Amino acid sequence: MLRELAIRNFAIIDDLSISFDDGLTVLTGETGAGKSIIINAVNLILGSRASPELIRTSEKTAELEALFEVPPESPAARSAGELGFDMSEGLLVRRMIQRNGRHKVYINGRLATTQLLSSINEHLASIAGQHAHQSLLKSEYHLVVLDQFAGLTELRGKVSGYYHEMLPLIRRLATLRRELAEQSGRRELLEFQVVEIQQAEIVPGEDNELEQERERLKHAERLYKAAGLCVDRLYGAEGAVIEQLTVIGRELQALAEIDRALSTLANRVETASFELEDVANELHSYVQGVVFDSQRLEAVELRLDTLGRLKRKYGGSLESVLAHGKEAEKELRRVSSLPDEITETELRLGRLYEELASQCRKLSEQRKRVAKSLAEKVQNELASLGMPKTRFDIRFKEVPVDENSDPHLALGSCGIEATGIDRVEFLIAPNVGEDLRPLAQIASGGELSRIILALKAMLATRESVETIIFDEVDAGIGGGVAEMVGHKLESLAGFHQVICITHLPQIAQFGKSHFRIAKAVYKGRTRTTITPLDGEARVEEMARMLAGVEITKKAMDHAREMIGRVKS
């Protein structure tokens, strides 16, 4: 329930505060006084988009603030609680609109977003104004009304849940099937590549080792002869290097006895002799190990040819060949698993489809069963609002099946949407002898206003919003019809807090609270004021609405009579 509304520097309002009570509150005033500005302010509080153009001329910031009383078990309290807000002391919403476009939203003192604000305020208030008139002309809104009236919101939610759970599975199944079709030839290639690389039994770095082995085998004879000759020159032949070093070493040892400065050199020669002797021994062993094997050379050449071919195909190195093999195995596993994934997805889709189909049938049956009752009640409500001969009916249509859509989105000859398999449209014949036609084709502004009020009255005990604001509810009506509308608003106020902007005294007389909105020039600036009315002040405002510019005694008496009649 809206308790307080404060507006600062908004349009032609400089500073305005209103306290609201429960029951029916009426706002009256001359055309252009700023009543629609208050509706715009509430819209912003509920989360609509803000614009810097709404800021009062010469000001940098506009500020809107509203305090809502939120019952603990209400949908709004549950929604806010889930988002971490404590509603025990109410809901305080504050919006700041700045010329630089950096608007701010605060909820109970915490900085928030407009999306968060909209999600909480969804159940706080609704505005039945021009937007509601436009919505009533759309068949999607008709289905919402029918489901609310029939108490099918929960069942409709189940249908929507199954539908949206199916959509990603439908897309996934299509993707899997497309991949399977595209990979039918790819699988054979991957299998060949995996087998080819696995059978090669590649050892990292073996190509370098094999190339060295090939060089040794190709030049075995040269290696054997040259290494053997080196052994002879070092050790075996007459006058070999080691033999001569031995002689030199002995001479230096002898000379060192004379000059000890030569002892170091003598030791170095002796060490070099020992080192060369080791070299000669290792060369001798090397010569003994030289392999002359043409078959092995052929095998090495063949292996290197195999490895070279694989390197050319798969990236230029054995490392890239092995990496390609791993990727091919991974992709092959993926391709090989596609049939199983498709089967699993089909099974999941099948189970969901059965649930969805069952709930869609149930939802459609209950809608059709209740539709006649809704149509009769609308006719009765319209009769009480001055449209006694009006006929009202609800036409059902099947959701059309898209030829290109997935079969899981069809049920027999019907398509399936998030709202089920039905589309409905409200038909009306306001005058005797006329055929039933869609609202959009024949309903006038006054008739739309009364239809909206009739629907609100019927849904009074079912709607979750705490506050309903009526703007333009008196469009196109007057006299006795206006009084009927006033009676209906008063009745609706028994279930909701109702705030109504009106130009008609026949409606204003039913207000439990009455405010007058006026526009005046103060210090060269236009400003809007709001004044709570009671007693003679209210009688005078009612007389102004009855008589216009010149308020006569007769108008005052009439106004006093109207107010007294309602109170009694």
Image (cartoon, grey):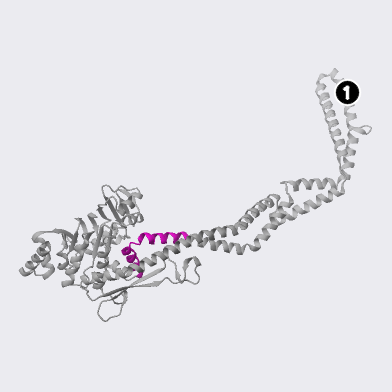
Q: Residue furthest left?
A: 553
Task: Report whether 459 appears left or right of 191.
Answer: left
Which image quadrant is residue 149 in? Answer: bottom left
- Residue at the spot 47% in from the left edge and 68% down from the top edge: 410
Q: Point out the image quarter for the C terminus.
A: bottom left
Q: Main secondary structure of the magenta part?
A: helix
Q: Residue furthest bottom?
A: 433
- Residue at the spot 42% in from the left edge and 65% down from the top edge: 360
Mark 1 crowdedness (10 Å alpha carbons): few <14, some 14-19, many ≥20:
some
**Which residues fall within the magenta stretch?**
139-166
Observer able to see residue 90: yes
Q: Amino acid at mark 1?
A: Arg
Residue 100 location (% of width, % of height): 33, 57
Observer able to see residue 57: no
191 in relation to 406, above or below: above
Seen from the viewer's position, the closer of residues 74 and 51 is: 74
Seen from the viewer's position, the closer of residues 508 and 250 is: 508
The residue under label 1 is 250
Q: Residue furthest right?
A: 238
Residue 518 location (% of width, % of height): 16, 63
- Residue at the spot 60% in from the left edge and 59% down from the top edge: 339
All told, the count of numbered labels is 1
Task: Report whether 338 appears left or right of 418.
Answer: right
Residue 528 location (% of width, % of height): 19, 61
* Residue 243 sits inside the magenta stretch: no
Residue 427 location (% of width, % of height): 31, 74
Identify the element where label 1 is drawn: helix
Seen from the viewer's position, the closer of residues 265 and 189 is: 189
